[in-house]
Amino acid sequence: MSLLPEEFADLEPFAEIWCLATEPERYAKRLASTVAQMQEFYDAITPRAEAAIGYCDGFPLEDLPEQVQNLAYLLYSMINVSFPVEVWSQPWVPDSGTTTLDCVLEPIP
């Protein structure tokens, strides 16, 4: 069974890895990933992001089907890796030492 809607089957190889429900999970995955892994994911999803957002917008936010919810999670992960890929060329925030960030509010769903 696929995790994503049929229209986004090309992103399916990334679904098991990057469809993560919470920000702490996404952040931990980012820190555990290499820049090459994040770049591969980012390069695959970025050209499809606008279509994915439009697709998700076709459903009520409070009642997303599971595959659409997973597509939204994939978009959230794209956002999470965007700075490391586009700016920092590393998974962590530069010059932050052992600083941590706990997200108390996150996108819902």
Image: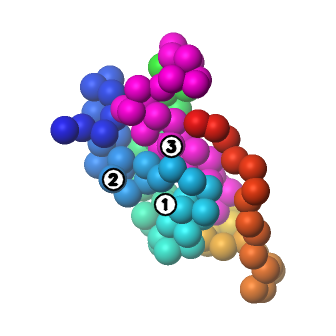
Relative to 92, say whether 55 is above or below.
above
Is there a contact, CB below 8 Å, between mark 3 and mark 2? no
- Tag 2, which secondary structure? helix
Q: Looking at the rendered structure, which numbered label has been put on residue 51?
A: none
- Name the magenta segment's main secondary structure: helix
Check the image and name the residue furthest to the top: 58
Measured in 3D between alpha carbons, the distance from the residue under mark 3 to the one under mark 2, in whole angstroms, is: 11 Å
Mark 3 crowdedness (10 Å alpha carbons): few <14, some 14-19, many ≥20 = many
Residue range highlighted in magenta: 57-86
Residue drawn at (79%, 80%) of the image: 99
* Amino acid on which the number 3 mark rests in the picture: Tyr
Per the image, is 69 magenta?
Answer: yes
Check the image and name the residue furthest to the left: 1
- Where the C terminus falls, by quadrant? top right
Q: Which residue is mark 2?
A: 16
Residue 5 x/y as whole percent = 33, 27
Query: Does label 3 or label 1 sit earlier along the sequence?
Result: 1
Q: Nearer the viewer, residue 47 or 66?
A: 66
* Amino acid on which the number 2 mark rests in the picture: Glu
* Amino acid on which the number 1 mark rests in the picture: Met
Residue 55 x/y as whole percent = 48, 19
- Tag 3, which secondary structure? helix
Residue 84 shown left or right of residue 26 in the figure: right
Q: Which residue is mark 1?
A: 38
- Residue 66 position by quadrant: top left
Residue 19 x/y as whole percent = 43, 49
Measured in 3D between alpha carbons, the distance from the residue under mark 3 to the one under mark 1, in whole angstroms, is: 15 Å
Tell me if I can see residue 33 in this picture. Answer: yes
